[in-house]
């Protein structure tokens, strides 16, 4: 089955142009969202992703109507691929049924990976510079003033560690790190 997906950003915007393109491409069922493309949390997109099955083809007028970020696009493509669903973007001439289309998907994946790595590299460079200038000290540690009392109760068997973590609002990893620190400081 050929399934279309249409998205405009607001209720006031018209969908006819995209629908006409999909009609020409022989789409049998269309899902239409009137919502921002900032993420994949869109009702009709979710319905479409649940609806598609092996052998179907999802067709969009352009990738920007389907996903606004490379990360979201690749996530959606991965979910379609898992279901053995093909994808066609008319504007960018991507058709995963063809070797050239699959190649373009690989290029998109590589570009997205490069983008992620570049962002991380720039972030680390910025942090290093800020540290060298004395402007970056890292995240301030969260204080748990009642930790020692709670830890003592756990050691005496008055409460469980899980109960102590809940009362302090502390994660399991933080609890056990604090336990190690407390035991180490008592050994010194």
Image (cartoon, rainbow, N blue to C red):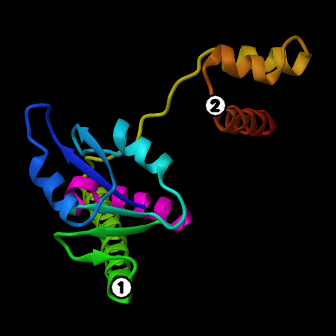
Residue 111 x, y percent position in the rendering: 30, 75
Answer with the quarter of the image where residue 96 lies. bottom left
* Left or right of residue 80: residue 119: left
Inter-mark Cα distance, 1 to 2: 44 Å
Q: Main secondary structure of the magenta part?
A: helix
Residue located beneath label 2 in the image: 171
Queried whether the magenta region covers residue 164, the answer comes back as no
> What is the tally of numbered marks visible in this picture?
2
Residue 67 seen from this side: no
Label placed on residue 156: none
Name the outermost residue toward the bottom. 99
Question: Residue at the location (26% across, 42% down)?
Answer: 32
Queried whether the magenta region covers residue 79, the answer comes back as yes
User: Between disc 1 and disc 2, whose residue precedes?
Assistant: 1
Answer with the quarter of the image where residue 44 lies. top left
Name the outermost residue toward the right. 157
Residue 174 x, y percent position in the rendering: 64, 35
Extent of the magenta region: 63-84
* Left or right of residue 77: residue 176: right
Image height check: is 70 above or below 7?
below
Residue located beneath label 1 in the image: 103
């Amino acid at each position: 089955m050929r399934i279309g997906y249409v998205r405009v950003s607001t209720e006031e915007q018209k969908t006819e142009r995209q629908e006409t393109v999909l009609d020409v491409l022989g789409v049998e069922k269309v899902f239409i969202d009137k919502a921002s493309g900032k993420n994949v949390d869109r009702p009709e997109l979710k319905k479409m992703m649940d609806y598609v099955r092996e052998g179907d083809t999802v067709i969009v007028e352009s990738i920007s109507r389907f996903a606004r970020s490379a990360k979201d696009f690749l996530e959606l493509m991965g979910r379609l691929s898992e279901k053995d669903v093909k994808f066609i973007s008319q504007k960018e001439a991507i058709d995963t049924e063809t070797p050239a289309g699959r190649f373009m998907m690989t290029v998109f994946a590589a570009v997205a990976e490069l983008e992620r790595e570049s962002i991380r590299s720039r972030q680390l460079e910025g942090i290093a510079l800020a540290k060298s200038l004395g402007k970056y000290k890292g995240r301030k540690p969260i204080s748990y003033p009642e930790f020692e009392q709670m830890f003592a109760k756990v050691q005496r068997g008055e409460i469980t560690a899980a109960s102590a973590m809940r009362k302090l609002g502390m994660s399991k990893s933080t609890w056990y790190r604090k336990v190690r620190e407390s035991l180490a400081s008592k050994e010194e």
